[in-house]
Amino acid sequence: MIEPELRRSLARLLDKYAQKFPQEPQVVARFREFLASGETLQGKVNPRRHVTASTWIVNPARNKVLLTHHAKLHKWVQLGGHTDEGEDWTLAALREAREESGLDNLQLVQPELFDLDIHEIPARPGQEAHDHFDLRFLVEADDQVALTVSDESHALAWVVLHDLERYTQEESQLRMKRKLYL
């Protein structure tokens, strides 16, 4: 996609999200401010912040979620990552999920955003702390298919949703669990 089309696409996603989740105006406002800033949204060229795309992958019974124990963050999170320049938001999320899990049978549950999150990535050698503006999509996959752990992860696990709190206390993860039951 070309840049203006990507910006319009993101604006539409944010509008629909704001309508569906009116209780989250602050995060939507921060995304809109970033969108209107004219700064580069995709890739890693913007050292302060960039848009990432993630998937909250559930099994068909919707009682498990696939999480990765992130190699750099050392915590359990959803699968996702950086968007490439010109890449469609949804396709970026699905690409990241395939790369990080080895799953080819990913099914987008809905074209709208499932969740929005802004989180700081801590500084590391050669990289300053920066913000990820994360677009999250709800995806379904067969939990009986073999997984492939990428070099971006320590491990992958299908986590029973009732046990999610044993893996993480991160509010963004718990919020997505709650949204699954809306």
Image: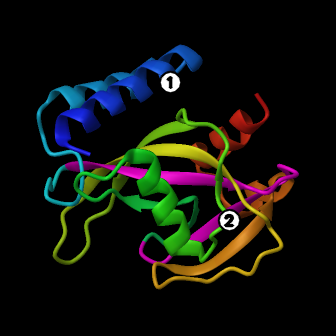
Q: Nearer the viewer, residue 4 or 137?
A: 4
Residue topped by disc 2: 105
Taking the magenta stretch, the answer to whether it contains residue 132 is: no
**Compared to 84, does 19 lie above or below?**
above
What's the magenta region? Answer: 49-72
The answer to whether residue 22 shows anywhere in this view is: no
Q: Residues within 10 Å of mark 1 (few under 14, many from 20)?
A: some
Count of numbered labels shown in the rendering = 2
106 left or right of 12?
right
Q: Residue at x 80, y 67 (%)?
A: 143
The vertical placement of 15 against 13, above or below, is: above
Quarter occupied by residue 32: top left
Instruction: Please tell me whether residue 15 is drawn above or below residue 140 in the rendered image.
Output: above
Q: Amino acid at mark 1?
A: Tyr
Q: Position of residue 67 (x, y in %)?
A: 64, 65
* x, y percent for residue 155: 62, 80
Query: From the viewer's perspective, is residue 177 above or below residue 100?
Result: above
Residue 17 circle label: 1
In the picture provided, is 81 more to the left or to the right than 173?
A: left
Question: Picture quarter containing residue 28?
Answer: top left
Disc on the earlier residue, 1 or 2: 1
Q: Residue at x 83, y 73 (%)?
A: 144
**Label 1 vs label 2, nearer the camera:** 2
Residue depicted at x 79% and y 34%: 181
- Residue 45 is situated, as x and y percent measured from the top left of the image, at 14, 58
Residue 96 at what x, y percent from top left? 47, 64
Q: Amino acid at mark 2?
A: Asn
Q: Secondary structure at mark 2?
A: loop
